[in-house]
Image (cartoon, rainbow, N blue to C red):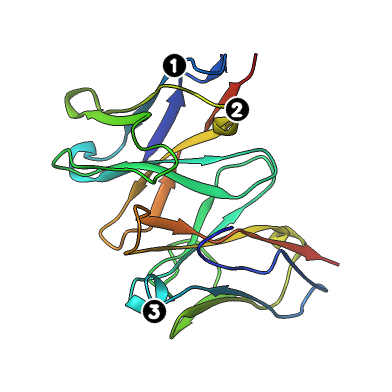
Amino acid sequence: QSVLTQPPSVSGAPGQRVTISCTGSSSNIGAGYDVHWYQQLPGTAPKLLIYGNSNRPSGVPDRFSGSKSGTSASLAITGLQAEDEADYYCQSYDSSLSASVVFGGGTKLTVL
Amino acid sequence: EVQLVESGGGLVQPGGSLRLSCAASGFTFSSYDMHWVRQATGKGLEWVSAIGTAGDTYYPGSVKGRFTISRENAKNSLYLQMNSLRAGDTAVYYCARTTVERDFDYWGQGTLVTVSS
């Protein structure tokens, strides 16, 4: 079980908007730690998509946006494209136990 | 251009050891915290270890006492010594760099470790 909870899968038609949630607790997201998002295309390494809750690295389209509230965060993708089909992971830090870096279990996005 | 290139993966028997390396280039290696993250086939990402710029190290409970992360700044290299390997350690191991915001902004291509008899 991952410390951060994501839906296993989401889907949408081209052009639509989808959101992926990332639910944590008072020891990670709720403690004020930033949330970061990664996109992993099949057979490749993860790629940073959103950092610091809502910031896009250079080169990431503005179709991707992130937000955080309380103990949860969300990734939104607008104008869905076939090339967006991938696995998406959220990541934060946790102050409990021995785990410092924590990831969500990942969400498979299917473009219908 | 920032590059991280892992090596050292392979097939090892349960209880055995393996040392992974990560060669860094394109940035001032000594100025960044570095991590190892693994991913079992078809599974999610799991953080394995971290080393700070001062050499401070961090591990999750699943590998603490078995894995040792180290760095050699003069060689721009990161290492992961893995001992007492188990079947559950089978995964692709990625090295990754973190920024001051503690996101992983660059990742290597990964190296596959298979623990099997």
Q: Secondary structure at mark 3?
A: helix
In this picture, is A81 found above or below B81? below
Kindly check if marks 2 and 1 are in contact, taking CB atoms under 8 A apart as contact.
no
Residues at marks 3 and 2, common chain? no
- Image point 40% across, 52% down: which residue? B104
Where residue B53 appears, as percent x and y from the top left, is 17, 43
Q: Quadrant of the N terminus of chain B?
A: top left
- Image point 60% across, 50% down: which residue? B44
The residue marked by circle 2 belongs to what chain?
B
Instruction: Identify the mark nearer the N-term, 2 or 1.
Output: 1
In this picture, is A80 found above or below B25? below
Residue A12 relative to residue B68: left or right? right
- Image point 83% across, 74% down: which residue? A13
- Mark 3 to mark 2 CA distance (whole Å): 34 Å
Amino acid type, callout 1: Ser
Residue B109 makes an appearance in the image? no
Label 1 sits on residue:
B17
- Mark 2 to mark 1 CA distance (whole Å): 12 Å
Kindly check if marks 1 and 3 are in contact, taking CB atoms under 8 A apart as contact.
no
Where residue B16 appears, as percent x and y from the top left, is 48, 15
Where residue A36 appears, as percent x and y from the top left, is 45, 65
The residue marked by circle 3 belongs to what chain?
A
In this picture, is B81 found above or below A43? above
Q: Secondary structure at mark 2?
A: helix
Residue B70 makes an appearance in the image? yes
Q: Secondary structure at mark 1?
A: loop
Label 3 sits on residue:
A30
Could you say which quadrant of the image residue B58 lies in?
A: top left
Residue B87 is marked as: 2
- Mark 1 to mark 3 CA distance (whole Å): 38 Å
